[in-house]
Image: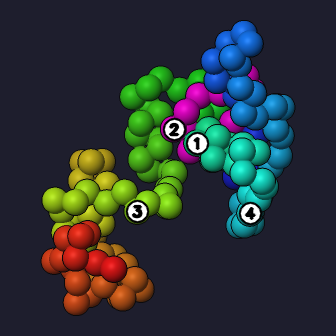
Amino acid sequence: MELLEVQNISKTYGAGEAAVHALKQASFTVPKGEFVAIVGESGSGKTTLLNLIGALDTPTSGKILIGGKDVFAMRERNLTVFRRRNIGFIFQNFNLIPELTVEQNIVFPVLLDYQKPDSRYLEELLTVLGLQARRRHLPSQLS
């Protein structure tokens, strides 16, 4: 089974003469354990594709399967849980919650999923990221 299957995915914004075809009939698969780079000119649909794969936007047509599951066939509540548990995004602008510390920003998604944060995993993340000494800093206090 493929980790990711993108099947004839298209995205059009607007309608009629104002329609913008951001993505047309894109198809590819990504096997588990593989890495993929999405490259292209400005305006070629890279961000649109990533937003669709991440279920942040819905396609005009086509399917996206993650782990064999049709993402857009899910009900909104199930999709929210699926997204929270299975999809991660690193945005160009880091999108941290400004009122929360580094540590709180890290555990926040876990709390949203009604789970208890794993303190060992938190320590490991802080170590890997080199943020142990800044764990109680706010995002505005980071460079």
Left or right placement of residue 74 versus residue 33 in this view: left
Please report the residue visible at 53 percent of the width from the left and 26 percent of the height from the top.
74
- The mark that comes first in sequence, 1 or 2, is 1
Q: At which x and y percent is residue 136?
A: 16, 77
C-alpha span from label 2 to label 4:
19 Å
Three-letter amino acid code at the position of disc 4: Ala
Question: Residue 65 appears in which quarter of the rendering?
Answer: top right
Of residues 31 and 43, the one nearer the viewer is 43
Looking at the rendered structure, the secondary structure element under dot 3 is loop
- Residue assigned mark 4: 37
- Residue assigned mark 3: 94
Of residues 7 and 42, the one nearer the viewer is 42
Q: At which x and y percent is residue 62?
A: 75, 27
C-alpha span from label 4 to label 3:
20 Å
Looking at the rendered structure, the secondary structure element under dot 2 is loop
- The mark that comes first in sequence, 3 or 2, is 2
Left or right placement of residue 121 versus residue 44 in this view: left
Q: Quadrant of the C terminus?
A: bottom left
* Proximity of marks 1 and 2: CB atoms separated by less than 8 Å: yes
Disc marking residue 51: 1
Looking at the rendered structure, the secondary structure element under dot 1 is helix
Of residues 41 and 57, the one nearer the viewer is 41
Three-letter amino acid code at the position of disc 3: Phe
Left or right placement of residue 56 versus residue 60 in this view: left
- Residue assigned mark 2: 56
- The mark that comes first in sequence, 3 or 1, is 1
